[in-house]
Amino acid sequence: MRPIAKVGIVGAGTMGGGIAMNFLNAGIPVVLLEVQAEALARGMALIRKNYEASAAKGRMTAAEVEARMALCRGSLDYADIGDCDLAIEAVFEAMDIKKTVMARLGAACKRGAIIASNTSTLDVDVLAAASGRAADVVGMHFFSPANVMRLLEVVRGAKTDPEVLATVLDLASKIKKVAVVSGVCYGFIGNRMLEPYLRECESLLLEGATPTQIDRAIEAYGMAMGPCRMIDMAGVDVAAKVVAERAKEGKLPADPAYRAACQALATLGRHGQKSGAGYYRYEGRTPVHDPEVERIMAELAGRFGVARRADISDAEIVERCLYPLINEGAKILEEGIAYSAADIDSVWLNGYGYPAAKGGPMTSANAIGLPQIEARLAHYAAQRGDAHGYWRAARLLGDLAAAGRRFGEA
């Protein structure tokens, strides 16, 4: 194990500040780095505001607020990260920007320091190579808000030193996170499985379902929040930028309608709750059905030759959103990206609001029956066509179904 007595964080935005609070709460000093004094001041002020809000609710004392703030030092100079044992980049989710930061950290950090990326989707091996010291690099994907959400995806790169992985897993428990190890792939475990879920949500919107209907069906299943409300809260513009980054990498399917809904809404300035309109319009923080979204979706359907219909049931919504998600989980297991079905369930229970009573998506799949899931995937492939392989069952899913076995069985 490597000792972690001081942590550097690059990026003082909402995510960087939230990450910093985890370490401050554990009594670990933090250097918070920004490139502009104004951004640094905003970041430090946001951390203080969060602590003062907790104090106002009686969750901590004014003295504890000051003690934690005293552990946090702001800086505009990478040299100030030179004596940190762990440095985490938490900058904008764009490969070029993150590669530049990783290269600077590789040059600035002391020998033996761990360098981590908070990327949610990007290739950790590419970022590790950019640092010039890939053995010291690991992904640490915190979930937003980082000072609240318990899940931490720890991404093992191809060259990550086992000691680095063990140190970060031990550190996760010290900062009260539930850590799950993932291999390198697009979106790791959680966001990779989220992608087909959101793809089908958007397809259903083009076909005639409303955001209200989709969210109602998914929330009735037990999810803490439906996909449209979730994206509005996270930022439609953020979702659209993730799709655009994938397009830049040439990694999207050859499907012109792929994730067209979020891209269209973002282009129109409908960025979600923060802009007052996204999949819904907002009265304060309350989502309200907006007929304009139906018009936008009908226009997109016409553009891409998608037939509109009025017979979309809640049961179809649940199956079309959740069965591809489960199928992606099977692929993740098949590829060795996740160590176990239980790890996948832990990601979804702790990071995505999956209903605890259902035990997670892979446990849910076992309860539904793997042959049933395989059959329904085949049904939608036949009904909708499968030119892009969206409905092709994972080999592992098919093998387990044929053998009468379940996810997680030895």
Image (cartoon, helix red, strand yellow):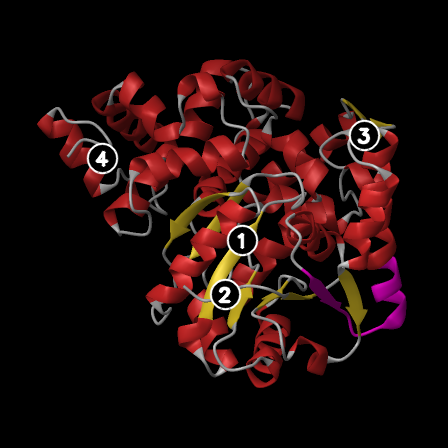
Of badges 4 and 2, nearer the viewer stands: 2
Say which quadrant the N terminus sits in.
bottom left
Q: Are marks 4 and 3 in contact (CB under 8 Å)?
A: no
- Number of the label disc, if any, that sits on residue 141: 1
Say which element carries label 3: strand
Horizontal and vertical percent position of residue 192: 44, 47
Q: Earlier in the sequence, mark 4 or mark 3?
A: 3
Q: Earlier in the sequence, mark 4 or mark 1?
A: 1
Say which element carries label 2: loop
Q: Earlier in the sequence, mark 3 or mark 2?
A: 2
Residue topped by disc 3: 281
Of badges 1 and 3, nearer the viewer stands: 1
Work out how far the residue at label 4 is from the one at label 1, CA to CA, in angstroms. 27 Å
Say which element carries label 1: strand
Instruction: Say what amino acid the circle numbered 2 marks.
Output: Pro
* Other residues around mark 4 within 10 Å, as few (<14) / some (14–19) / many (≥20): many
Work out how far the residue at label 4 is from the one at label 2, CA to CA, in angstroms. 42 Å
- Number of the label disc, if any, that sits on residue 397: 4
Q: Earlier in the sequence, mark 4 or mark 2?
A: 2
Q: Earlier in the sequence, mark 1 or mark 2?
A: 2
Q: Magenta part of the protein: which range?
A: 29-42
